[in-house]
């Protein structure tokens, strides 16, 4: 018996962790190579089981701030036979307090934010600039899909998309206008 085709588009998306699962990351912010490889093996097993049983066809990653770690993760997934698209999960830094709770942060980003931590607008502008640069590097490496985590703070994500030329400001709702944020981030 043939399965019925649904008129609704349906995707099953699996989470991927470029730095290893947060539970495997030590107090130094880094997972051991054994934990990372174990996480990759689990992802491959999970993809095989879900692909067969439910039709998973995409991986979206946990947020990260080091593009090289994401690109290594993609290469490592390919090395072990994971062939589905891998979409990078990018979260703009919007506040200093929110930033402190995030995944592995490169030292240069921590240092830059320490200098502006008491200026909310400067932190947001830096987050937009950083998010834009991360996206540019990812796109330059042949990844054509981005996932921007907004966590109800969509203006930064919209500003990044405008910086990348993916959307035009005139197409953004007036209540979400971000032109002043984009101008500050580019300065």
Image (tube, grey):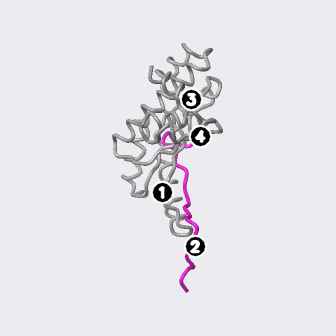
First to last magenta residue range: 1-22
Q: Secondary structure at mark 1?
A: helix
Looking at the image, do the residues carrying marks 4 and 1 touch, with CB atoms under 8 Å apart?
A: no
Q: Secondary structure at mark 2?
A: loop
Query: Which circle's residue, 3 or 4, is located before the other in the chain?
Result: 3
> In the depicted view, which residue is nearer to us: 19 or 151?
151
The spot of residue 37 in percent (x, y) is 46, 46
Q: Secondary structure at mark 4?
A: loop
* Disc 2 target residue: 6
Using the numbered discs, state the Cα–Cα distance from disc 3 to disc 4 in whole angstroms: 22 Å
Query: Which circle's residue, 2 or 3, is located before the other in the chain?
Result: 2
Using the numbered discs, state the Cα–Cα distance from disc 2 to disc 3 in whole angstroms: 38 Å
* Disc 4 target residue: 173
Of circles 2 and 4, the one toward us is: 4
Residue 44 marker: 1
The spot of residue 13 in percent (x, y) is 55, 56
Using the numbered discs, state the Cα–Cα distance from disc 2 to disc 1 in whole angstroms: 28 Å
Using the numbered discs, state the Cα–Cα distance from disc 2 to disc 4 in whole angstroms: 32 Å
Q: Residue at x 60, y 17 (%)?
A: 117
Of circles 2 and 1, the one toward us is: 2
Residue 93 marker: 3
Looking at the image, do the residues carrying marks 2 and 1 touch, with CB atoms under 8 Å apart?
A: no
Looking at the image, do the residues carrying marks 3 and 4 touch, with CB atoms under 8 Å apart?
A: no
Query: Which circle's residue, 4 or 1, is located before the other in the chain?
Result: 1
Of circles 3 and 4, the one toward us is: 4
């Amino acid at each position: 018996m043939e399965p019925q085709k649904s008129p609704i588009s349906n995707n099953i998306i699996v989470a991927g962790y470029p730095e290893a699962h947060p539970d495997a990351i030590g107090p130094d912010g880094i997972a051991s190579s054994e934990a990372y490889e174990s996480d990759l093996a689990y992802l491959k097993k999970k993809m095989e089981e879900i692909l067969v049983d439910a039709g998973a066809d995409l991986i979206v990653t946990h947020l990260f701030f080091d593009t090289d770690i994401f690109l290594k993760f993609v290469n490592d997934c390919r090395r072990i036979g994971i062939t589905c698209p891998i979409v990078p999960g990018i979260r703009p830094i919007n506040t200093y307090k929110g930033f402190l709770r995030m995944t592995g942060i490169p030292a240069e980003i921590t240092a830059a934010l320490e200098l502006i931590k008491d200026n909310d607008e400067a932190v947001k502008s830096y987050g937009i600039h950083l998010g834009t640069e991360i996206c540019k590097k990812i796109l330059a490496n042949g990844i054509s899909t981005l996932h921007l985590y907004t966590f109800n703070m969509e203006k930064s994500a919209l500003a990044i998309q405008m910086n990348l030329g993916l959307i035009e400001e005139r197409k953004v709702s007036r209540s979400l206008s971000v032109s002043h944020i984009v101008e500050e981030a580019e300065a």
